[in-house]
Image (cartoon, coloured by chain):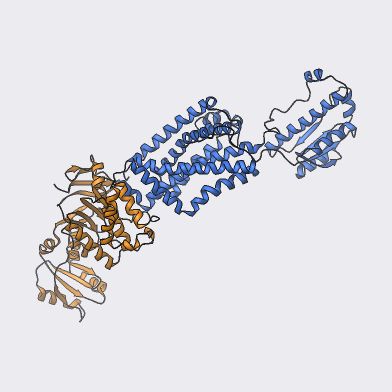
């Protein structure tokens, strides 16, 4: 069984082309990440997988069934966590959990067993009487996830689940997702954070309705053919503007702690140092570095823009 | 089907946690009945009156006495002339001036048909009409008394054409307006609660995002709709009960007919208003929009229902439009059951019309409501 297969999906909102022929396949028991900035088309795609939107063109298969004609099947077998926190703020943690158990026809005895298990790993047990609206951001996300686990779905669709959550809670959340993967639950997750992308089994980098790269994160990094040199700087934007006059814009990337340079012409680090010397301050020096997903994403984005 | 119960249970948890809601259910109908029951009165009381008495006879004295005694009028001035009366009317000090001509008593006794003139401030058309009617009524009463004094036999008397009674005499002493107002308010409350709260409650789930979450569950469309409307039908009925109690305890007006019939027909009526609420929710993104749309339709329904303005007073084409208004039928039904105890047999036409509208509206609105994002 293939959990999810997306084939050549197009979707327009009036004049705006949200998705321009996207396709990928999610394998059983993996965490598949859709990585991209806001407006890339991630949420549209997620909503189509859970049958809330229809594609204009192309097919989506959910457990080998066409989503459009089997929406009742999809909706009873998927665990969907929308982008916004969407539980009842005026119901308690326990009431929310039981309500979703009820909606998915989980028998009462089973609900209570599962409740205990979910309390254990989410550590929400002590807060079960608290209103959902009074929980912290991280706890809210754990509750939303738990609600979706009440019916033990085979596949989970999580749309930016860690958005606005503190780093510690994000880490905890990802540990939970790891546990779920070990139990065999297939997960499709979207995130704008590159550090989270690295925790997925496979990722699709998506930008402006197109997939730019699709593979395991390590593989994508290993396949990147160029060296990256990092120039640490106190005033990165000034450095960036200076370098613009000697280098192609697609080869320099502005970061908070400095500028990253792509060695597209394979000059090597020493030649690059000499080449840039005149434009650098004394304490700014190119250093050998490994490409990370963000470098690769920015480079692919640039390439995409040039094509258009 | 179990899922409907879970939805209803969830909805009630939320309703009971909202303190303002409890207030709306129990305090609002009470206050409305009390305030509107006392305030909205079409009975004419305390109309200021001036009299120009050119005759100064015992007969003219009797007329003045009669006006002085009734609570409908306050006798303010004895005026010199018609001109003085006109001035008082212009200044707004009196609403009605009665002018008794010279030789009134003599003409009356010699059957010369004296003419008593009434000048009425017509700014408030309703009061003016009623005041006119009262003036005629008092004049008629006096004529009968005089004729009896003069020894005319009652049989002859009953055949005589006396002062013409103003035909706009819609209100008489026994039918007080609060009798009309109380069932009317209950009907309006039912309209508002079912249309507004249903629509707003669905849109609220849209606003906070829970509707998107609910859509991706096995719940069916009709279950979602039932789960939304059942709680508000129950709320609406509680509210009706409070209204009925308030009307009974404060104004002594109880339901004369079958309360079961009243509630059964109220459900039938609610189909239209619930349909309106669901429709509003399908075209709105925010609670304000839903509220505005529901209000837009509700205000027409209320104004064209015959509650405040009698339908036969409306222009012909508007009267035709009122046939499309389910509240029009329900106002008739609730008044009939409430005040006269009319059984269903005599209300079949209204019930049928209301039922058809309800089913059509509700079905169309429910079809518009689907578990998909646009």
Q: In the rendered image of this protein, which colour is used for chain A?
A: orange
Residue at the image position 51 percent from the left and 25 percent from the top: B349
Which quadrant, please, contains the C terminus of chain B?
Answer: top left
Given residues A188 and A42, the one toward you in this image is A188
Please state if B214 lies on the left or on the right of A62 as rendered.
right
The image quadrant of residue A253 is: bottom left
Q: Is residue A160 visible?
A: no
Q: Where is residue B254 in the image (x, y as percent from the top left)?
A: 60, 37
Q: Position of residue B13 (x, y in %)?
A: 42, 51
Please state if A206 lies on the left or on the right of A89 as rendered.
left
Residue at the image position 79 percent from the left and 43 percent from the top: B88
Q: Position of residue B281 (x, y in %)?
A: 41, 44
Given residues A144 and B113, the one toward you in this image is A144
- Chain drawn in blue: B
Q: Can residue A290 be seen in this view?
A: yes
Q: In this rendering, is residue A61 above or below B312? A: below
Please state if B186 lies on the left or on the right of A245 as rendered.
right
Given residues A168 and A148, the one toward you in this image is A148
């Amino acid at each position: 069984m293939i959990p999810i297969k997306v084939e050549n999906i197009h979707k327009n909102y009036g004049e705006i082309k949200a998705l321009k022929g996207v396709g990928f396949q999610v394998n059983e028991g993996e965490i598949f990440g859709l990585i991209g900035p806001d407006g890339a088309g991630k949420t549209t795609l997620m909503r189509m997988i859970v049958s809330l939107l229809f594609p204009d063109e192309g097919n989506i298969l959910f457990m080998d069934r066409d989503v459009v004609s089997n929406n009742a099947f999809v909706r009873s077998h998927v665990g969907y966590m929308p982008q916004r926190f969407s539980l009842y703020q005026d119901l308690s943690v326990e009431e929310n959990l039981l309500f979703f158990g009820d909606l998915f026809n989980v028998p009462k005895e089973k609900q209570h067993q599962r409740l205990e298990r979910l309390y254990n790993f989410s550590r929400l047990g002590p807060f079960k009487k608290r209103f959902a609206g009074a929980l912290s951001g991280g706890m809210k996300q754990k509750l939303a996830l738990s609600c979706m686990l009440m019916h033990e779905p085979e596949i989970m669709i999580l749309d930016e689940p860690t958005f606005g959550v503190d780093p510690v809670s994000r880490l905890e959340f990802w540990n939970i997702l790891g546990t779920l993967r070990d139990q065999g639950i297939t997960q499709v997750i979207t995130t704008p954070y590159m550090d989270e992308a690295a925790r997925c089994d496979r990722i699709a980098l998506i930008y402006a309705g197109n997939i730019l790269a699709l593979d395991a994160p390590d593989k994508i990094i290993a396949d990147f053919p160029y060296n990256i040199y990092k120039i640490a700087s106190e005033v990165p934007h000034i450095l960036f503007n200076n370098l613009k006059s000697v280098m192609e814009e697609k080869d320099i990337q502005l970061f908070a702690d400095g500028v990253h340079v792509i060695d597209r012409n394979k000059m090597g680090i020493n030649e690059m140092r000499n080449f840039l010397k005149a434009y650098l301050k004394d304490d700014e020096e190119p250093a050998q570095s490994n490409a990370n997903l963000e470098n690769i994403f920015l480079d692919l984005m640039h390439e995409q823009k040039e094509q258009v | 089907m179990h899922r409907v119960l879970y939805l209803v249970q969830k909805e009630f948890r939320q309703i009971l946690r909202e303190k303002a809601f409890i207030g709306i259910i129990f305090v609002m109908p009470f206050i409305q009945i009390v305030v509107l029951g006392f305030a909205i009165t079409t009975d004419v009381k305390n109309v200021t009156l001036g009299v120009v008495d050119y005759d100064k006879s015992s007969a003219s004295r009797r007329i003045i006495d009669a006006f002085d005694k009734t609570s409908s009028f306050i006798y303010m001035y004895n005026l010199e002339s018609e001109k003085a009366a006109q001035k008082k009317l212009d200044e707004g000090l009196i609403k009605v001036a009665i002018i008794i001509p010279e030789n009134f008593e003599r003409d009356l006794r010699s059957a010369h048909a004296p003419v008593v003139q009434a000048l009425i401030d017509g700014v408030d058309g309703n009061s003016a009409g009623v005041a006119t009617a009262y003036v005629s009524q008092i004049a008629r009463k006096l004529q009968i008394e005089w004729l009896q004094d003069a020894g005319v036999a009652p049989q002859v008397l009953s055949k005589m054409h006396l002062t013409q009674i103003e035909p706009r005499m819609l209100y008489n002493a026994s039918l007080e307006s609060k009798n009309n107002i109380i069932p009317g308010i209950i009907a309006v409350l039912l309209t508002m609660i079912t249309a507004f709260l249903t629509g707003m409650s669905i849109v609220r789930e849209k606003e906070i995002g829970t509707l998107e979450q609910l859509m991706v569950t096995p719940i069916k469309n009709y279950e979602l709709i039932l789960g939304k409307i059942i709680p508000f039908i129950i709320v609406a009925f509680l509210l009706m009960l409070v209204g009925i109690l308030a009307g009974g305890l404060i104004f002594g007006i109880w339901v004369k007919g079958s309360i079961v019939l009243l509630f059964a027909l109220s459900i039938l009526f609610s189909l239209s208003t619930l349909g309106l609420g669901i429709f509003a929710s399908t075209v709105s993104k925010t609670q304000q929009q839903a509220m505005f749309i529901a209000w837009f339709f509700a205000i027409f329904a209320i104004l064209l229902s015959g509650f405040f303005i009698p339908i036969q007073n409306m222009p012909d084409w508007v009267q035709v439009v009122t046939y499309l208004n389910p509240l029009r039928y329900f106002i008739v039904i609730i008044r009939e059951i409430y005040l006269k105890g009319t059984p269903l047999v005599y209300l079949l036409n209204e019930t049928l019309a209301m039922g058809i509208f309800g089913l059509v509206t509700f079905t169309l609105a429910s079809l518009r409501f689907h578990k998909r994002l646009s």
